[in-house]
Structure formats: structure tokens, C-alpha cells
């Protein structure tokens, strides 16, 4: 058996319309989303915008969604957000945290192209074999849509798999996963149910209460997820990812930046590459291979051979035979 593990980052979904980490809060992205909002939602977005603009300007976080999400989740955990000197009492960390999750989900939902480029189907049909594994750091549902159209079921690694399911380990959660604050169950549902959970439009399958929350995990692995029942599930997913990586015959990263802000991901690849000495070459596909990207990978995949491929997702899939991906 020849097992390929595909590791997907935001860049994988870019050709299907989803913004990357830095594009998320760009003027273009915000004005596009604004057109889909009602007046209450517009006010919510404006207050979020003024929050993150101030934070970026003051140097609390970098100008990208990952850094802002890390900052807000840490603030929520530490309960310090409303106590910072200059803006004491102006911000409620819990509210900002929820609003930011709403913005992330709404943006992904609204920016996904109605017609996903056909190459994504080609990826599933011609590259992704049943024995392969996907490790995804994305919340979006691009692959889910493509698999659904092809009538292929998904095994998220959190319930008993059926034969021919494709294994997708979403290490930062997913737009269609929810957990219940009341009974502690966590489970995948349909479409962008995380958004409905935030507005309390859906009830828990188990206890029938409107106490569902989205499962969107910031790169810092916000402490809540380690303490509660949900933490067990996330930890299992990461352990499974580690196991799949050290049993892999080939590892291909697509649109994943291996950023320093995601220390847990870096450590995951450090550990697993150490445990898989037979795997010689790692493929890194990215539409802008920079020296920063190269450094990020060299820090994580210590002493490994890395082949950088400067292509967008769609172009890579078009040319996959040339790279002997299978
Ligand atoms: Zn419940």
C-alpha cells in the first residue's frame, strides 16, 4: 500500500474563492462580505473592524486573521481583555470571540464560489486514493462539497468509518462541527451549522437545548478545548494525524504556510518527520514560494529534503502527473 498524506492550508481553498490568512481582513474581502449583511450584522462587523484595526496599530497582533484570532482567544482565556489600561471596559472578550468566529464563518460561506473549479473534482478522482489521508487546517467546506457531489462519504476520524470513506482530519475544527456547552457532545452536522449555533438557531441533537457552539480552533489551541470533553476529541485527532504522518509514504503540503504562529503544527511535523526517517522528500505546493516560507518549512522538517513547487492549487492539480504525485 502506498499512502500519501495531503496537508492542506488556506491556500488550498483559494482557487475555490476562500481568502488566505492575510486576505481575510483586506478591504476587498470586507466590502464583498458587507454586501451580504443586514444592518445589525453591518454594525457588528464595523465594531469588530475598529477593534482589530486598533489592536494591529498598537502592535498587539499582526495584520492577519490568525494572529487576531490567537490574540482574542488568549484574551478570553485570561479574562484580561476588558482590563487593558487604555480601553478599560470597552470590550467584552467573550463577545469579540463570538463575533470573530461569526466573521470567519460568514466570510468563508459567502466567498466560496457557487461553481467550484473542476480541478477539485480531479483532485479527488485522480489523486486522492481510499488509503490516502487528508490533514486539513481549514474550516471551510470545499472538499466536503466536492466529495458530496461525487457521492463519497467522509470519515472525520471521530466516529466509526465505513469502507471507502475518505479520512479527513481537520485539526482546527470545521464550519460544520458543533459542540454542546450543556451536555458536552461534539459532532459534525450539515453545511455552515457553526453560524446557526452562534445565533442559537439550532438545538443540540442530544439534550435539545440551544447551547451549541462552533468548533473553530485558533492556532494556539485555546485552553477550553484541552479542559473540556471536546479537548479529548481534538487531542485524539492530533494524535491520529501524527500516526498517519509517520506511516506515510509520501507527504504533500498544499497551500499551507507552516507559519510560526502555529507552533503546535510545527511541532507535529517535527515529531512525525523524526519518527518517519524513511520518507526522504516532502513536497510543498504554494502559489508564492518565498524565502520566509522556505525557512518555516526548514525549521519544522529538520534535515529533510523539501521540494518546493511554485503553483496554485488548480495549476498543481492540472499538472499532477508531471510531478509523479501518484
Ligand atoms: Zn447537548
Image (spheres, rainbow, N blue to C red):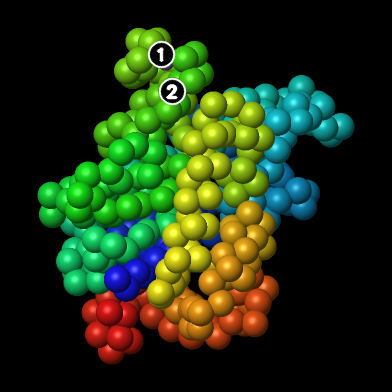
Is the residue 323 above or below the residue 10 in the image? below
For the N terminus, the quadrant is bottom left
Q: Residue at x 26, y 47 (%)?
A: 154
In the image, is 197 to the left or to the right of 281? Answer: left
Query: Would the CB of label 2 be found within 8 Å of ligand 1?
Result: yes
Q: Ligand 1 sits in which quadrant?
A: top left
Decide which of tag 1 and tag 2 comes sooner along the chain: 2
What separation in Å lies between label 1 and label 2 (alpha carbons)?
A: 13 Å
Give the secondary structure at mark 1: loop
Residue 302 in picture, x, y percent from top left: 65, 77
Give the secondary structure at mark 2: loop
The residue carrying pointer 1 sits among few (fewer than 14), some (14 to 19) or many (20 or more) residues within 10 Å by Cα, namely some
Q: Residue furthest bottom?
A: 322
The residue where tag 1 is placed is 210
The residue where tag 2 is placed is 185
* Closer to viewer: mark 1 or mark 2: 2
- Location of residue 89 (image quadrant): top right
Question: Is label 1 in contact with label 2 (beta carbons under 8 Å)?
Answer: no
Residue 32 in picture, x, y percent from top left: 38, 49
Residue 267 in picture, x, y percent from top left: 64, 60
Q: Nearer the viewer, residue 151 or 213?
A: 151
- Location of residue 98 (image quadrant): top right
Which numbered circle lies on residue 101? none
Q: Residue at x 43, y 69 (%)?
A: 248
Q: Residue at x 40, y 18 (%)?
A: 200
The residue carrying pointer 2 sits among few (fewer than 14), some (14 to 19) or many (20 or more) residues within 10 Å by Cα, namely some
For the C terminus, the quadrant is bottom left
In the image, is 283 to the left or to the right of 46? Answer: left
Q: Nearer the viewer, residue 278 or 251?
A: 278
Residue 220 in picture, x, y percent from top left: 65, 46
Amino acid at each position: 500500500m502506498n499512502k500519501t498524506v495531503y496537508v492542506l492550508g488556506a491556500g488550498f481553498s483559494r482557487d475555490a474563492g476562500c481568502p488566505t490568512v492575510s486576505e481575510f481582513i483586506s478591504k476587498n474581502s470586507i466590502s464583498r462580505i458587507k454586501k451580504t449583511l443586514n444592518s445589525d450584522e453591518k454594525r457588528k462587523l464595523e465594531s469588530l473592524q475598529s477593534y482589530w484595526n486598533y489592536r494591529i496599530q498598537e502592535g498587539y497582533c499582526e495584520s492577519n486573521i490568525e494572529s487576531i484570532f490567537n490574540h482574542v482567544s488568549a484574551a478570553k482565556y485570561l479574562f484580561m481583555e476588558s482590563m487593558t489600561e487604555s480601553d478599560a471596559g470597552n470590550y467584552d472578550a467573550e463577545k469579540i470571540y463570538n463575533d470573530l468566529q461569526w466573521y470567519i464563518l460568514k466570510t468563508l460561506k459567502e466567498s466560496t464560489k457557487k461553481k467550484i473549479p473542476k480541478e477539485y473534482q480531479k483532485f479527488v478522482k485522480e489523486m486522492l486514493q481510499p488509503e490516502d489521508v487528508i490533514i486539513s487546517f481549514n474550516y471551510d467546506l470545499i472538499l466536503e462539497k466536492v466529495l458530496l457531489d461525487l457521492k463519497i462519504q467522509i470519515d472525520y476520524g471521530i466516529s466509526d468509518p465505513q469502507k471507502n470513506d475518505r479520512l479527513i482530519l481537520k485539526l482546527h475544527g470545521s464550519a460544520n462541527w458543533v459542540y454542546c456547552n450543556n451536555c458536552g457532545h461534539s459532532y459534525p452536522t450539515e453545511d455552515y451549522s457553526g453560524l446557526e449555533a452562534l445565533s442559537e438557531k439550532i438545538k443540540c441533537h442530544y439534550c435539545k437545548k440551544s447551547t451549541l457552539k462552533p468548533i473553530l480552533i485558533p492556532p494556539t489551541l485555546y485552553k477550553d478545548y484541552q479542559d473540556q470533553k471536546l479537548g479529548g476529541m481534538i487531542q485524539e485527532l492530533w494524535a491520529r494525524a501524527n500516526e498517519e504522518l509517520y506511516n506515510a509514504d509520501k507527504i504533500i503540503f498544499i497551500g499551507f504556510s507552516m507559519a510560526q504562529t502555529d507552533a503546535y503544527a510545527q511541532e507535529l511535523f517535527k515529531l512525525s518527520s523524526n519518527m518517519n526517517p524513511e520518507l526522504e522528500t516532502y513536497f510543498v505546493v504554494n502559489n508564492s514560494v518565498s524565502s520566509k516560507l522556505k525557512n518555516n518549512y526548514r525549521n519544522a522538517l529538520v534535515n529533510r529534503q523539501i521540494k518546493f513547487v511554485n503553483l496554485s492549487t488548480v495549476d498543481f492539480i492540472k499538472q499532477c502527473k508531471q510531478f509523479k504525485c501518484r
